[in-house]
Amino acid sequence: MKRIIAVANQKGGVGKTTTTVNLAACLAQAGKRVLVADMDPQGNTTSGFGVDKHNVAHTSYSLLLGQAYLEQVAVEVGIEGLQLLPANIDLQGAEIELIGQPGFEYLFKNILSHAKYLYDYILIDCPPSLNLLTINALCAADSILVPIQCEYYALEGLSQLMHTIELVQRKLNPHLAIEGVVFTMYDARTNLSNQVVEEVRQHLSAYTYDSIIPRNVRLSEAPSHGLPITLYAPSSKGAESYINLAKEVMKKEGIGRV
């Protein structure tokens, strides 16, 4: 089943980009054809794959503004079966330029509709806010994968995100579903991490993944080397966790609705 998955959370610093990069790499290494779309002007996903975001011919910005085709924008990242739509700070200007365009919410959906059948998975890394870029991603997606940091304020952010998903379903994309909730930056030594996992699972048990991403030094180091964790430190706990998450994503047959 081909899927477009938006990796999103309105709260920043929750491991959204780390999850996008490493989940995509694990899916590709499992033999899947994967496209990653960097829709965050910070371009951290682009850097995380070792691509120089300041020195690319075309970006997601070019794509959204009709200045290039997807085939011209997609770049190889050194992992068989995986391609990237890079982004940089130019993408910030797309928000202003899209305002007033008829049907701007569905611009990315229309672009990806032509490419969806070329890939098994398309992962979209969204900005940490509900802006026009995030709305475009959620309108294009079949489902949303939500990384949640195991800390107190995560619970407050989760309720806001669920409200956002409901709004998008009602107004823009009635088919948007919850792909799953993944816990990140888990520290087994703290009561707080365990409390967050327990409370979220109480409310969203049908959507939470069994795989939990731990706080891991190697995971923190990998982006500075421009490598996913399975290439930087394949025997680390972080690599093991993302491999398990990819297996869960591939096995998931039914995806839930808010």
Image (spheres, helix red, strand yellow):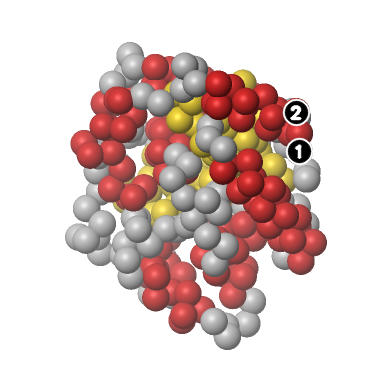
Q: Nearer the viewer, residue 7 or 63?
A: 7
Residue marked by disc 2: 202
Instruction: Name which residue type carries label 2.
Output: Gln
Marks 2 and 1, Cα distance to the nearest angstrom? Answer: 16 Å
Q: Is mark 1 on a helix, strand or loop?
A: loop
Res 5 seen here: no
* Residue 219: quarter of image: top left
Residue marked by disc 1: 256
Q: Residue at x 21, y 61 (%)?
A: 54
Quarter of the image where the C terminus is located: top right
Q: Which residue is drawn at 32% across and 62% down?
A: 88
Q: Where is residue 132 in the image (x, y as percent from the top left)?
A: 55, 69
Q: Which of 140 and 6 is in front in this view?
A: 6
Determine whether label 2 and label 1 are within 8 Å by CB. no
Q: First in sequence: mark 2 or mark 1?
A: 2
Q: What element carries label 2?
A: helix
Q: In this view, does 245 lie to the left or right of 1?
A: left
* Residue 163: quarter of image: bottom right
